Amino acid sequence: MSEPILKVRNLKIGATVYPPGEKPHDIEIVHGVSFDLERGKVLGLIGESGAGKSTIGLASMAYGRGGVEITGGEVWVNGRDILQSKMRDIRKLRGGEVTYVSQSAAASFNPARSIMEQVIEASVEQGKFSKRDAEARARLLFDKLGLPDPDNIGRRYPHQVSGGQLQRCMTALALCPEPDLVVFDEPTTALDVTTQIDVLMAIKEAIRDTGVAALYITHDLAVVAQVSDDIMVLRHGETVEYGPVHQIINEPQEEYTQALVSVRSIDHEEKAPTEEPVLSVRNISARYKGTKFDVLHSVNVDLYPGQTLAVVGESGSGKSTLARVITGLLPPREGEISFAGRTLSADFNTRTREDLRELQMIYQMADVAMNPRQTVGTIIGRPLEFYFGLRGAEKRQRIIELLDEIELGEGFMDRYPAELSGGQKQRVCIARALAAKPKVIICDEVTSALDPLVADGILKLLLNLQKIEDVAYLFITHDLATVRAISDNIAVMYKGKVQRYGAKSQVLSPPFDDYTDLLLSSVPEMKIGWLEEVIANRKMESAGN
Amino acid sequence: MAPILKLLAQRIALSLLLLLMISVVIFVGTMILPGDVAQSILGQSATPEALANLRAELGLNDPPVSRYFQWLFGALQGDLGNALTSGQDITSAISTRLANTLFLAFWAAVIAVPLAIFLGLLAVRYKDRWPDKLISGVTLASISIPEFLIGYVLMYLIAVKLRWFPSVAMINDGMNLWQKLNSIALPVAVLTLVVLAHMMRMTRAAILNVMQSAYIETAELKGLSTFKVIWRHAFPNSIAPIVNVVMLNLAYLVVGVVVIEVVFVYPGMGQYLVDHVSKRDVPVVQACGLIFAAVYIGLNMVADIVSILSNPRLRHPK
């Protein structure tokens, strides 16, 4: 057995926290993690947010994000303990021996400089290559990673290429200096499923061809199963389970790992449309102000009372625009929307209070959808005052009822959003929407920003509330697993058109059109070798290329 | 037309429109000022007939609108009229004065702008450590002390005690560049101290703002030194706010130096303006006002143009 490239022993990482109303104090966020990584191998670090996986990844470059500090243990890279190294030597290591691919390439590229300048910067700076050789190598990598026009794409600026392309450029950036180790930190999480698959394949091939070792950090076990040799499951800064990929996926030993492997336990029986639809979208075409192209083309969908219509598609497919049209934020160019038997005014400004009350919305980013200076009680109480004129004890009683419904309870009434976890924040937003006693709630990617297990809890809650309150959901998402879990009807959107529409069982059964097939086959499966299989069987290219 | 050219054309057109509107404001403003030029020329003892004659001679009885257009068209052709008090041609009187003021402002800017940006970068590099605190403290102190006081203190220490530079900043055409620079050293020093703080603090704030970005982390993880990270990755993205504040300060160097020119008896625009305001010489005040407005608008226009050009999304459209 050769000497590992990366050897981590009993790594401890701390941070200073500033809880509201308390004195700042130090906490430990990673409690003694150890692992080895050999040349040419890939280790997957997996866990929920807060598990310390990114922190561990960055520690292999002796870097602490924000107030994070490495407090103990050893990190050996190529046979020397980098935690004992001088800053000068650490700089030599970063961008030379160890490189980093971040989650959001769009934010990680400097908007003011061309892609090529940034891709070769570390190689030239570390003296690995001359500028000319580095550029030649970058072009080679662009080609290998499947980027279009590899000879010229380097001259472009980050805003001139798509998200999936930029993520590949970031991979080229990391591979350019011929590092010994690359840290991939959720490199495909921000991408559409159909784009993710291509980037994943590109990364996998690049790792194989260059013989580099990699740490692959993600919260998605199905993704990590495709690229890793070993997997380490982390929770609350501790190792839960560490072993070869086939053991973790096929014979998980720990309960937590088993939960991760079998996530999406919801089984929802689809309901047949019964009465008249509560919301009917008729021939809607819409475009944004100052543009000359429709982003929605004659969209027709129906939502039945007490049921869920899932609208699925990649980013740019027009699904969020549809929500904006229904809520009246974007008056359509053509078509109309009927709601509970009446025609809705196109602009929300001219809608009646009843219209506004009966159509509520829940957003993807719960933290920015709430006023950080209001307590949970105030946030939920506002629609009660506004729509029902509730005051005092009566209002308080209703707020408590709502807090019980979302399984938080009275104790949360005086808390501020900053004191809540991501899942709890989204629950408060659900309670706020429910407070108005709506007929329809538009859920725009409400679980996309959450960890799988937390998202699962939110979906169960939504289904449960649907039974109690008889509310209908228009559920916008790019995640097909979510769609399977909760929908009765499905509309698949592609480039502003409804590509496929009908009952869940029908939409998700063959024969498929090419796009739906691509979308469905792109959802990572918890199966080793799935990636190669899918790529081999594809009928069309994803739109993100 | 490329969107960037359209934006630039719009911005330039807007500046010209603004300048035209300012000319109206200046003209109306000087019209409604109390006092009478004829009276101040002839003094309290003048006879009504003499006053009436002088008014007619100076054209003060013409309707305001026609006087405005006469003045505007004259100004467009470079003719700012004659001073009421001395009968001198204003354009030629102002041009030497303006040249002197620009000369002073130019050298102050040459020293102050790079120094302010360098100090700002340094403050970011050593954020919250002693160099940052020292730079912030000193520049804040220098902006807080009234400029005339700084002027007199420097004059006492450097001109009177150390005798390095003259206390009076007289310049004339017979001097060579070195003599001129020697002569204006003190006012340049004072002006530098006055404008330094604002520009340095804005540079620091703008760069610190950008330092939060993810791409700064990327640069750090490439193993670049802190100063390279700031210079190559943070600075290019903070140009717009920095240029804005630099241009505001350059404008101040041109139009706000009245006090300094008086303190150092420097033959610039400021002194000229102050002299003629006290004599109610309306055409001179109008001419100075128009030139100052043009300088302000022009420099701010340059700031906006640089901001537009520094935006990669506009420079390299999809």
Image: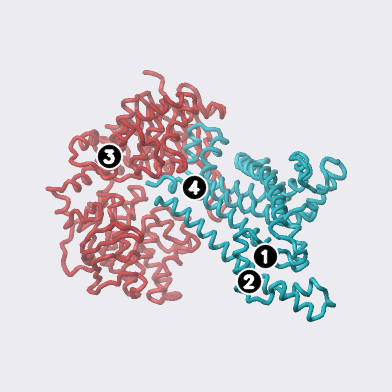
Chain colours: A red, B cyan
| Quadrant, the C terminus of chain A | top left
Badge 4 local density, few (<14 within 10 Å), some, or many (20+)?
some
Q: Nearer the viewer, mark 1 or mark 3?
A: 1
- Label 3 sits on a secondary structure element that is helix
Q: Can marks 2 and 4 be said to lie on one chain?
A: yes
Q: Where is residue A126 in the image (x, y as percent from the top left)?
A: 49, 26
Say what amino acid the circle numbered 1 marks: Gln
Q: Residue at x 25, y 49 (%)?
A: A480
Contact between labelled residues 1 and 4, with CB atoms less than 8 Å apart: no
Q: Mark 4 points at which residue?
A: B309
Q: Residue at x 75, y 64 (%)?
A: B87
- Label 4 sits on a secondary structure element that is helix
- Label 1 sits on a secondary structure element that is helix
Say what amino acid the circle numbered 4 marks: Leu
In the image shown, does B44 or A45 lie closer to the viewer? B44
Q: Which residue is drawn at 69% across and 66% down?
A: B283
Q: Where is residue A370 in the image (x, y as percent from the top left)?
A: 44, 61
Badge 2 local density, few (<14 within 10 Å), some, or many (20+)?
some
Q: In this view, does B261 lie to the left or right of A29?
A: right
| Residue B286 image label | 1
The chain holding disc 2 is B
Q: Is residue B133 left or right of residue A167?
A: right
In the image shown, does A267 or A113 lie closer to the viewer? A113
| Quadrant, the N terminus of chain A | top left
Q: Which of marks 4 and 1 is in front?
A: 1
Q: Mark 3 points at which residue?
A: A197
| Residue A498 image label | none
- Label 2 sits on a secondary structure element that is helix
In the image shown, does A454 or B107 lie closer to the viewer? B107
Contact between labelled residues 3 and 2, with CB atoms less than 8 Å apart: no
Say what amino acid the circle numbered 3 marks: Ile
